[in-house]
Each structure stands twice: as C-alpha cells, then as structure tokens.
Image (tube, rainbow, N blue to C red):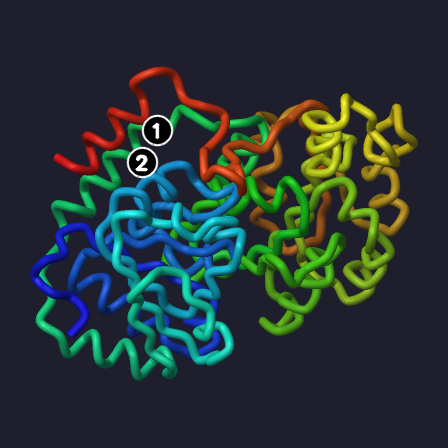
Amino acid sequence: MIFHSIYSKPILLLGNGIRQSGALELVHEFIRKTNIPVLTTMNGVDLAQGDIHIGFIGTHGNRVANLILNECDLIVSIGARLGIRQVGRDAKNFAPKADLVRCDIDEYELSRDIKPNEKKYHTDVRDFMRMLLNEEVSDFSVWRNRCLEAKKYLSDYDIQPGNKAVMKISDMLPENPVVSVDVGMHQCWCAQSLHLKGYKGRIHIGGGFGSMGCALPYAIGSSISIDNGKVFCICGDGGFQMNIQELETVRREHLPIKILVLNNRVLGKISETQHFNHGDRFAATAVSGGYTVPDFQKISEAYGIKAATLSSYEELDNYKEWFDDNEPCLLNIFLPEDSLLTPKIKFETGVISPVLPEGVEEKVKKILND
C-alpha cells in the first residue's frame, strides 16, 4: 500500500514514460478519483492539461511547482527519469519533507538512489496504475485547492515577454491542438506557460533529446501522421534557421502548419549565460558577437507560404483567421532582445532565482501548509 494515512500532502509527478506505456487514461482516472495535485517533467508537460495543470518541475520549472515539491510529504513519480535537471546537484535538496515512490520500466534508472528509503517499482506503468486504482485512497481536494491557490498567488511573478507571448498563443489555439516546440529559451517559456484546452492535445517537445531545429520536422511528421492535419509549430529565431529549408516540404505537401517564430534576434539561452557569467561577451549569440537574423517573412513568401511580421505578440489577434484556416503560414513575432528566462534553480544551492520580494515565499508556504 502506497497511500498510507500518514500522508496529507501527496503529489503525482508525471513523466513521458506514461505516454510511452499507453497508460494516460488510467492516470487521468486515478487523478479524477483522488484529486491529487499533479506536477510534470518538461518532457511530460502535455500529460496534465485543462484544470489538472499546475506546472512542471526542475531547473526552469514553474516556481509554484518547485515550491510545492518543497512542502509535499509524498511524491509518486511515474515514468519520470528524475535526472539532474529535476533533482539538482545535491539530492538532499530535492523534496526535503517527502517520501519518494518511483515507478520506472528502466532498471538502470531505478539503480540510482534519489532519496534514502525510497520505494521502487520496476514495472510497466499500466500495471502500477491498476495497483493504485485498487487502493483505498482519500480525496485530496483540499490539498489540491491549496496548490491551485498558491499558483494563483504567484501568477504575477516570473512573467517575461516570452511567457506573455506563449500565453497569448495558448488563448488562440483550438481545443486539443497538436503543437511542436523547438529547443532554446522559448522551449522553457512553452513548458511554463503553454496551457492547452481539453485533455487530448499534444505538445511535441524534445527536452534532452531534441536539438535546435527540431520543431519544424516534428510538425511535418505530426501533420502527415494525422492525415495532413493542422499543427502549430513554435520556434526561436536560432532554431528555425537550422531547418528553414523544410518550408519547401511544407509548401510542396500542402501541410497546414502554423509556424510561430518567437524572434528576439539572439541565441537566448547561451547569450543569457554570457550576460550573467561572462561580462556580456556575446560570442556568436548576438549582433555584437556575429549572430544575425534574416527577414523570415520574405523567406517564407519566397517559398510560397503566406507570412507576416509582428512587432508584438499583442498583434496576434489580427491573425485569428490564419490560426483557423487550412493553409500553412508563418508569423514572425518580435520580442525584446533582452528577454530573460525565469525562474531558475541554482544547481549548487537549490535556491530559486530571482529572489521574490520579502514575504511572498513565506505567504506561499503558509497557503500550502494551512
């Protein structure tokens, strides 16, 4: 038995192994039965959609998700690798108040100990979920509501222009969309802020397996797999240039792929490191260091794909019909060059930066522990 009466603040931590095992319906059944709060890994962000979405954990995870980890008393990790980006350099800082239960099909992942006395299940997720569904588990609606209250309280923090752009895109997407995401700063903005309507949408996100340029090939494959259906492709300006020639495939095959380029004219994640750690020596990541960006609108039109350049994500409302029609398009959306990616957990200390104003984190802890 996993859910002993001693636990009052459990969470489910969902990883992409759930989808690979075909167990998502069983997981959702258990969530509806118990109202346990759900957090995800980056690769599993589309496992929790609609009203069960709270956030994802890890280095650039939602702040509320990482604060919930710090206050919960049980983590049931399902199909999640729990690598260094989730656990950090020192595992002692990971969920310090919680017991850990891990389900994984990979015995080599389970051979790593994350916490002392953790309980491990080397089994298929479907069998594990059937076992959980047979347990007598309390209803955790009160605890879940506290988590959602904490999420609402923190909703005005850690919001960068990239997050606002992604939230605007979320508002314009149809129910149950298929979305592909490239690698870079925008990948984290999407993992943090791309909220899907419905429960059957997909976010194809590379995580640790993707490389810059993966979103457009992901979108092409996704569209073909659903009978040339509509796919939304979110790229950064750097990643998009890696496979820009595939616009010809999109045009030739008449694929209704909606390409949204979040264009801050820099290679964001590396330039941010160069800004904070190397005195703004932007080697090959910004104009001053030899990185430049072409006119994506003209390139797209040269391939025969309609395109527009937007000075701000706020102009997206003017292109609602482009989201709805069955033609490919490209929207080149400018963001400020100094757009940042927040929050971030420091590997060495586990501290989440930037530090919140005095009293805010204490208020979150109070909400979660009342």
Residue hosting label 1: 154
Question: Mark 2 is on which residue type?
Answer: Lys
Q: Badges 1 and 2: C-beta atoms under 8 Å apart?
A: yes
SS under mark 1: loop
Q: What is the x, y in percent for residue 24?
A: 36, 71
Q: What is the x, y in percent for residue 210?
A: 68, 60
Question: Mark 1 is on which residue type?
Answer: Leu
**Please, is residue 31 above or below residue 140 in the view?**
below
Residue hosting label 2: 151
SS under mark 2: helix
Residue 180 image-quadrant placement: bottom right
The residue lying at 76 percent from left, 54 percent from top is 213
Q: Is residue 316 left or right of residue 62?
A: right
The residue lying at 11 percent from left, 65 percent from top is 4
Answer few, some or many: residues within 10 Å of disc 1's Cα (few below 14, many 20 plus, some between 14 and 19).
some
Q: Is residue 109 left or right of residue 122?
A: right
Q: What is the x, y in percent for residue 46?
A: 45, 57
